[in-house]
Image (cartoon, helix red, strand yellow):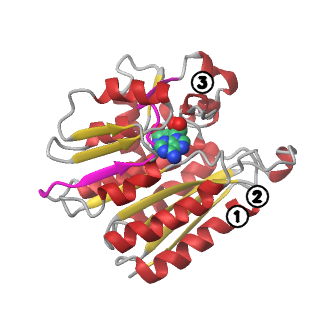
Amino acid sequence: MLAYRHAFHAGNHADVLKHLVLTRVLRYMGEKDKPYTLIDTHAGAGGYSVEGRYAQKNAEYGTGVSRLFDAKGLPEPLADYMSLVRAFNPDGQLRQYPGSPAIANMLMRETDRLRAYELHSTDHRILVSYLEGRANTQVSDRDGFTAIKAELPSPTRRAALLMDPSYEIKTDYAKVLAALREALERAADTVVMIWYPQLQLLESSQLAQRLKGSADATAKKGWLHVRLTVAEPADRPDGKGLGMLGSGMFIANPPFTLHDELAECLPLLVEKLGQYDGANFVLEQKAA
Ligand code: SAM
């Protein structure tokens, strides 16, 4: 039985970073006429109410997406992501937050294939009903890590993979590393996006380095790593490494445009989402 429910965290700073990256990747994939496949290995429920009991518990969206919702003059990539959030809230108030399948649903064409995996039975059921009727779509309640073997190489050849586990179980760190390796072995030009939490835990602090080492040898078009730190370690004295200081995204085979797009947005994200003076970002890439 999984305890994690993304509804508690929807729209927080980590979702902002993750969904900004996802938006840029899908926009880029959509520029070519040829269809592509998106495999979302840990898809969640699809969309979330920020007015609901879960999201209200810690109101994480309050230090995340709501700090951008009414902002003017955003850099174009952030404005584009926020236009999707606004499209999800047609009455102009922030009431709902789109999860990765909703963002995908807004950006993907009918001919593009969506494969979404969600293990939690309730979230799986909500996701099935959310995506019902969408062409070229399958929603599975199987373990998302099995998607690599089942879905790659994809019939469309062009493929993107979003791996967004909750890291509730420490073995997720080793699993994403193995999954990256396997995905690139099966299709070396897959755009692999991996989200990770920035925690005071060895597994978390070593993950980016390990992913880089793996992608160095296998990713046809190099990699990009972005991390946004918003909170001060001393602010999280739980001693268990549970408090999230920020989060990161590792992207193998990123669009060549992604680095500059993120460079344009990150200073503003630090300013808007930072919770202390030392808030900062890391942006690094290795070209092929
Ligand atoms: N990707 C979603 C988004 O951006 O809106 C959020 C996903 S949330 C961080 C992680 C999800 O993975 C949870 O809904 C959890 O139930 C699900 N999950 C956990 N382990 C899984 C597994 N092995 N396979 C598929 N889903 C899993």
Image point (44%, 48%), residue name: 144
Counting residues from the start of the chain, the first of labels 3 and 2 encountered is: 3
Which residue lies under the disc numbered 3?
Answer: 55
In this rendering, would 255 be left or right of 286?
left
- Using the numbered discs, state the Cα–Cα distance from disc 2 to disc 1 in whole angstroms: 6 Å
Which residue lies under the disc numbered 1?
Answer: 205
Magenta residues, as a range?
33-49
In this rendering, would 87 be left or right of 203?
left
The stretch drawn in magenta includes residue 277: no
Residue 254's image quarter? bottom left
The local secondary structure at tag 1 comes to helix
Tag 3–tag 2 contact (CB < 8 Å): no
Let me know if residue 83 appears in the view.
Answer: no
Q: Residues within 10 Å of mark 2 (few under 14, many from 20)?
A: some
The local secondary structure at tag 2 comes to loop
Image point (29%, 30%), residue name: 131
Which residue lies under the disc numbered 2?
Answer: 201
